Image (spheres, rainbow, N blue to C red):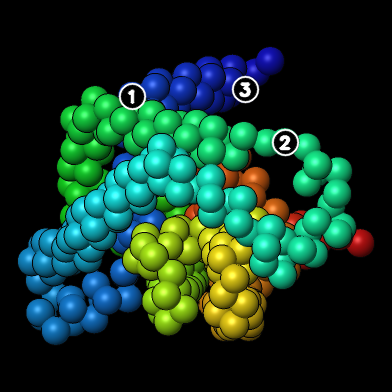
Amino acid sequence: MTRQQLFAVFFFAVFLFLLVQLYALLSLFLVPLIWAVILVLTFYPLYTLLLHLLRQRATLTALLMTFLILLLVSVPVFFFSRILTNEALDLYRQLRDAAQSGELQRFLSGWRETRLGQVWQQWGPQVVESELDLAGLALRAANATSQFIVSQASVVARNVFVFLFDFLIMSFSMFFLFRDGEGFYRTLRDLIPMEPAHKEAIFHRFYETVSAVVQGMVATAVVQGMLAGFGFWAVGMPFSFFLACASAFFSLLPLGGAATVWVPCVIYLAASGLWGRAVILLVYGAVIVSGVDNILKPLIIGGRTKLPTLFLFFGILGGLKAYGFLGIFLGPVVLATIMVFVNIYKEEYGS
């Protein structure tokens, strides 16, 4: 081994060791840092516009953008979570009271007299003949719901400091990423040992994917939640706001989506004998609510990321398993970056 090779091995060994130590130092802050990067990339076009209007005052613009994003995120979350919690508790109390008073048992037993119940008795005799303690099951479900709410409340109470700490780190990071982000980007880009065109393609695809996924997911969730809430209100479903928020949340998930919420509501209306409302909600949910998912997501996400729908589906699903809720956004980014590297490989080394 020559002297230069020895120096190179030593340098890269120490450099790798230092990178591992850097990860150990920053691992506690990775989640809020990633959220800060996602939000900054999403709102960066607005930042550039505001920076131009404020005559290139980067510090003032970064401060205004940070406060704007915090208001856009924190105020609606606080407002909707308060209403959502109240409706969820009311739903639990009504379910518990109905189970204890026997009203729920009478409802579940009376559904056999409806058309849906008659169909069920015809096609499912083995299930019907088995005697189920429906009231007991409902009461246990209510108790499980109560325990879940109490446990989640205690978890939230214990983790208030962690949440506030992460929120502070995210806010602090957003300010500096807005103000100095372009410099960070240029430094990182210059450190990557690749052709300039390839580096530009990678960073461009990364930016497009992050902004497209965030905008597509949020837009789809908001539109589906509003449309579903209007449908629940129109057919007279109780707790329509709670159901609308649940539809918006489940629309972020790749399996089921908003149908996870409106399909059980259709069954509830049919079991109550309200067949007209059930059919209306079924058609409305299938055509309008779920139809939005088939239009907005491919239009916003698939069109900009150039990812096939199948890859996008598995990217989101795999991202959820690998990274938790953050994986909804990171999964497609990883796939899009891999696609760029595949294209570079085809250009440079393909036959």
Point out the image quarter for the N terminus. Answer: top right
Cβ–Cβ under 8 Å for marks 2 and 3: no
Disc 3 on helix, strand or loop? Answer: helix
Q: Quick one: label 1, few (<14), some, or many (20+) residues within 10 Å?
A: few
The residue pinned by badge 3 equals 5
Q: Quick one: label 3, few (<14), some, or many (20+) residues within 10 Å?
A: few
Is residue 117 shown above or below 95? below
Q: Residue at x 62, y 22 (%)?
A: 5
Q: Quick one: label 2, few (<14), some, or many (20+) residues within 10 Å?
A: few
Of badges 2 and 3, the one in the foreground is: 2
Cβ–Cβ under 8 Å for marks 1 and 3: no
Q: Residue at x 69, y 58 (%)?
A: 112
Q: How many marks?
A: 3
Q: How far apart in space, not on screen, are marks 2 and 1 (Cα)?
A: 59 Å
The residue pinned by badge 1 equals 25
Q: How far apart in space, not on screen, are marks 1 and 3 (Cα)?
A: 30 Å
Of badges 1 and 3, the one in the foreground is: 1
Residue 249 seen by the camera: yes
Is residue 215 shown above or below 17? below
- N-terminal label among 2 and 1: 1
Q: Quadrant of residue 123?
A: bottom right
Q: Quadrant of residue 274?
A: bottom right
Q: Is residue 119 left or right of residue 100?
A: right
Q: Residue at x 24, y 81 (%)?
A: 49
Of badges 2 and 1, the one in the foreground is: 2
Query: What amino acid is labelled 1 in the image?
Result: Leu
Query: What amino acid is labelled 3 in the image?
Result: Gln
Disc 2 on helix, strand or loop? Answer: loop
The residue pinned by badge 2 equals 131
**Residue 23, image x, y percentages:** 41, 27
Q: Quadrant of residue 186?
A: bottom left
